[in-house]
Image: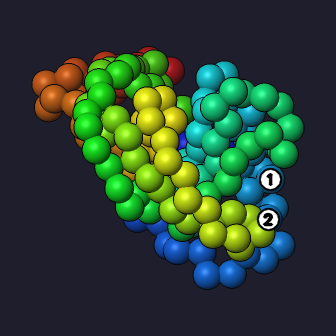
Amino acid sequence: MDILTYPHPALRLVADPVKNIDQEIQDLIRNMIKTMHQAPSGIGLAANQVGIPKRIIVYNFHREEGEEKAGVLINPEIVMSEGKIVREEACLSIIDFSAEVTRHAKIKVQGIDRNEKPVAIEADDLKAICFQHEIDHLNGILFIDHISSLKRALYKKRLKKRLRTD
């Protein structure tokens, strides 16, 4: 699968909840995991990033190959958050850019897995950041929306220049 890059309009869509985990959804999950593992440094991927506006994220914090090593959350939602953490973030959909972003330091996220079993995960630090980042994607929000308007404008200007020269 191709990972869409900013400013593709699909990245701004609010994803629809998954109502039925059928073979099509299982195939999508499998392809998303493969795509995430093939990407140079991604530890998470939202369905929006591959052009499918469904509330599905896949993740693998240790970047271990294999479908069974990746986590899957369907219809995820953050049900608890506390504290603040500032950390450098990047995104597979935002070309050649990273910036410090303020997020919650600890969260609890709930959803269902690919076998329709309820899942509740408490996460902190990098894992909490990853879940927040990917759930933002499902809501049409990019990490650059969390940075100053000046930094965002500079990035957009640099991107326009790069797209003109490519």
Q: Where 122 falls versus 79 (above or below)?
A: above
Residue on which disc 2 sits: 26
Depth check: 133 or 129 in front? Answer: 129
Depth check: 164 or 94 in front? Answer: 94
Residue on which disc 1 sits: 30
| Side of 97 where 31 appears, left or right | right
| Mark 2 nearby-residue class (10 Å; few <14, some 14–19, many ≥20) | few
Residue 23 horizontal/vertical position (percent)? 83, 73
Depth check: 132 or 4 in front? Answer: 132
- Check disc 2 and give the amino acid type: Gln
Q: Quadrant of residue 73?
A: bottom right
Q: Residue furthest bottom?
A: 19
Q: Secondary structure at mark 2?
A: helix
| Mark 1 nearby-residue class (10 Å; few <14, some 14–19, many ≥20) | some
At a point 44% along the width and 36% down the height, the residue shown is 124
- Is there CB contact under 8 Å for labels 2 and 1? yes
Residue 118 horizontal/vertical position (percent)? 63, 69
At a point 29% along the width and 24% down the height, the residue shown is 86
- Asked whether residue 55 is in view, the answer is no
Residue 150 horizontal/vertical position (percent)? 13, 25
At a point 62% along the width and 23% down the height, the residue shown is 41
Query: Disc 2 to disc 1, how far (Cα)?
Result: 6 Å
Q: Secondary structure at mark 1?
A: helix
Depth check: 152 or 66 in front? Answer: 66
- Check disc 1 and give the amino acid type: Arg
Q: Where 134 falls versus 24 (above or below)?
A: above
Mark number for residue 142?
none
Q: What is the tally of numbered marks visible in this picture?
A: 2
